[in-house]
């Protein structure tokens, strides 16, 4: 058993929010990655996909998830199971907090395989990366 104290959680900031790693392969030797997303008001995350399923449980605030061209409005208490390899983009007017889980080694990528977000942490062109908060 591994106990990870709140003070030991790993925090990663991006232009759109903060990801706080609660457990992962490098934090607690977990086989699943679990992190908290705090997205600031008026933000739109990058269009991207993951090669594995993710589960998002919303704690507070609200967001719209564009999942393969379908808009899903979510709020406190809602849980969304995002399938692998489906493009997604999260937008929020008021901000939100959510807990996310995915299998260890989940890789993010650009659905088009071209370009990428200007953020240094985002995948570029056709690369697939394990985000810092999921490592």
Image (tube, grey):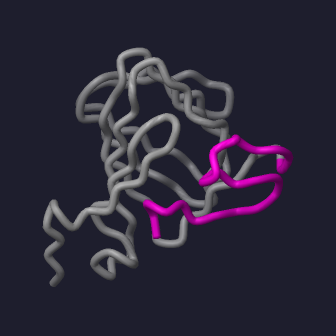
Q: For this rendering, which residue is in front, 123 or 78?
A: 123
Q: Which picture quadrant has residue 61?
A: top left
Residue at point 40% right, 33% down?
Answer: 39
Q: Is residue 47 left or right of residue 63?
A: right
Q: Which picture quadrant has residue 87?
A: top right
Q: Please tell me whether residue 36 is drawn above or below residue 104 in the rendered image.
A: above
Q: Please tell me whether residue 19 is drawn above or below residue 45 in the rendered image.
A: below
Q: For this rendering, which residue is in front, 86 or 15?
A: 15
Q: For this rendering, which residue is in front, 132 or 2?
A: 132
Q: Please tell me whether residue 108 is drawn above or below residue 59 in the rendered image.
A: below
Could you tell me residue 122's position as x and y percent? Answer: 64, 51
Does residue 88 belong to the magenta stretch?
A: no
Main SS type for the magenta part? loop
Could you tell me residue 69's position as x and y percent? Answer: 68, 26
Q: Which residues are magenta?
A: 113-135
Residue at point 76% right, 62% down?
Answer: 127
Residue at point 39% right, 77% down?
Answer: 25
Q: Tally the marks.
A: 0
Q: Is residue 7 left or right of residue 131?
A: left
Does residue 114 belong to the magenta stretch?
A: yes
Which quadrant holds the N terminus?
Answer: bottom left
Could you tell me residue 64's position as x and y percent? Answer: 48, 23
Could you tell me residue 123's position as x and y percent? Answer: 69, 54
Residue at point 34% right, 55% down?
Answer: 11
């Amino acid at each position: 058993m591994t106990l990870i104290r709140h003070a030991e959680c790993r925090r990663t900031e991006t232009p759109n929010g903060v990801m706080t790693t609660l457990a992962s392969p490098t934090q607690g030797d977990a086989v699943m990655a679990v992190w908290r997303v705090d997205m600031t008001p008026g933000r739109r995350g990058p269009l991207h996909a993951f090669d594995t399923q993710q589960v998002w449980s919303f704690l507070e605030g609200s967001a719209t998830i564009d999942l393969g061209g379908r808009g899903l409005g979510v709020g406190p208490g809602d849980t969304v199971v995002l399938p692998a390899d489906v493009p997604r983009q999260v937008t929020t007017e008021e901000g939100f907090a959510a807990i996310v889980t995915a299998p260890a080694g989940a890789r993010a990528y650009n659905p088009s395989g071209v370009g990428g977000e200007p953020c240094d942490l985002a995948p570029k062109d056709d690369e697939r990366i394990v985000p810092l908060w999921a490592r």
